[in-house]
Image (spheres, grey):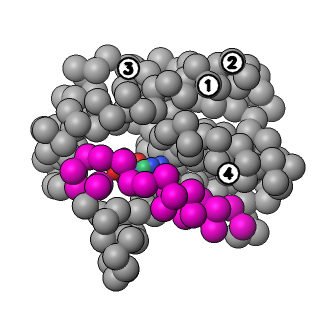
Amino acid sequence: MFIVFLGPPGVGKGTQSRRLVNELGVPHISTGDMLRRAKAADSPVLAEAVRSMEAGQLVSDEVVLNLVNARLQQPDCSPGALFDGFPRTRVQAEGLDRLLAHRHTPLDLVLELYGDEQELMQRMLRRATVEQRADDQRETIQQRMRVYRQQTEPLVQYYQQRGLLERIDAMGTQDEVFQRIMGAVERHR
Ligand code: AMP
């Protein structure tokens, strides 16, 4: 199964998607993790990407699509994959459609996790204190929320029109949210 996880920063995409990949036995493709790992690499393109991340801006579509394209060619992706934090723009969504069409493995499901924005802000501020993530400072968090609303939220409609979207209430315990996710996955299997 090829699944996309959509949702604003702090909604729990990372935690829930790691649980789901364990359950489904497909790789977890988090472009945020890939970009954070790429930090160490010494290339001007990646240096620019790191600057965008630290400012709470999106990394260029081209960089992200190249990373995903390379990852999808690895053999562990043949049974499917779970995309976490990707796509984030219309260009990326269309790019993903092309990559998957080329492999004859269309997208099966898009899970949109949604929650109260104020609550999500509080969650992220707590996480910033624990993990000391540079991109989780208050202004950056607000910036990331704005970017989500402007650039990523329109994808909800893009996928809804194609009948791929399942909306998941992400407020509740981790177990409750995971049960809702599994319910949606079962309906699309
Ligand atoms: P995440 O861990 O998914 O919240 O991503 C952290 C940061 O990495 C984001 O705020 C962006 O700067 C960058 N990033 C991750 N995924 C993408 C993507 N699909 N497109 C553009 N930028 C991304």
Q: Earlier in the sequence, mark 3 or mark 2?
A: 3
The span from disc 1 to disc 3 (Cα, nearest Å) is: 20 Å
Q: Earlier in the sequence, mark 1 or mark 3?
A: 3
Task: Determine whether 165 is above or below 8 in the image.
Answer: above
Task: Tell me whether the residue at label 1 lies in contact with that at label 2, contact meaning CB atoms closer than 8 angstroms.
Answer: yes
Q: Earlier in the sequence, mark 1 or mark 4?
A: 4
Residue at image location 41% in from the left, 63% down from the top: 35
Q: Nearer the viewer, mark 1 or mark 4?
A: 1
The residue pinned by badge 2 equals: 161
Q: Secondary structure at mark 4?
A: strand
Q: Position of residue 131 (x, y in %)?
A: 21, 54
Secondary structure predominantly adopted by residues drawn in magenta: helix
The quadrant where residue 180 appears: top right
The residue pinned by badge 1 equals: 158
Q: Which residues are magenta?
A: 52-73
Q: Nearer the viewer, mark 3 or mark 2?
A: 2
Is residue 47 shown left or right of residue 160?
left
Residue at image location 19% in from the left, 42% down from the top: 140
Q: Earlier in the sequence, mark 2 or mark 4?
A: 4
Say what amino acid the circle numbered 2 marks: Gln
The span from disc 1 to disc 2 (Cα, nearest Å) is: 6 Å
Q: Secondary structure at mark 1?
A: helix
Say what amino acid the circle numbered 1 marks: Tyr
Q: Is the CB atom of the residue marked by disc 3 within 8 angstroms of ligand 1's nearest atom?
A: no
Q: Is residue 61 magenta?
A: yes
- Mark number displayed over residue 81: 4
Q: Nearer the viewer, residue 109 or 58?
A: 58
The span from disc 3 to disc 4 (Cα, nearest Å) is: 24 Å
* Picture quarter with the N terminus: top right
Q: Earlier in the sequence, mark 3 or mark 4?
A: 4
- Mark number displayed over residue 115: 3
Q: Is the CB atom of the residue marked by disc 1 within 8 angstroms of ligand 1's nearest atom?
A: no
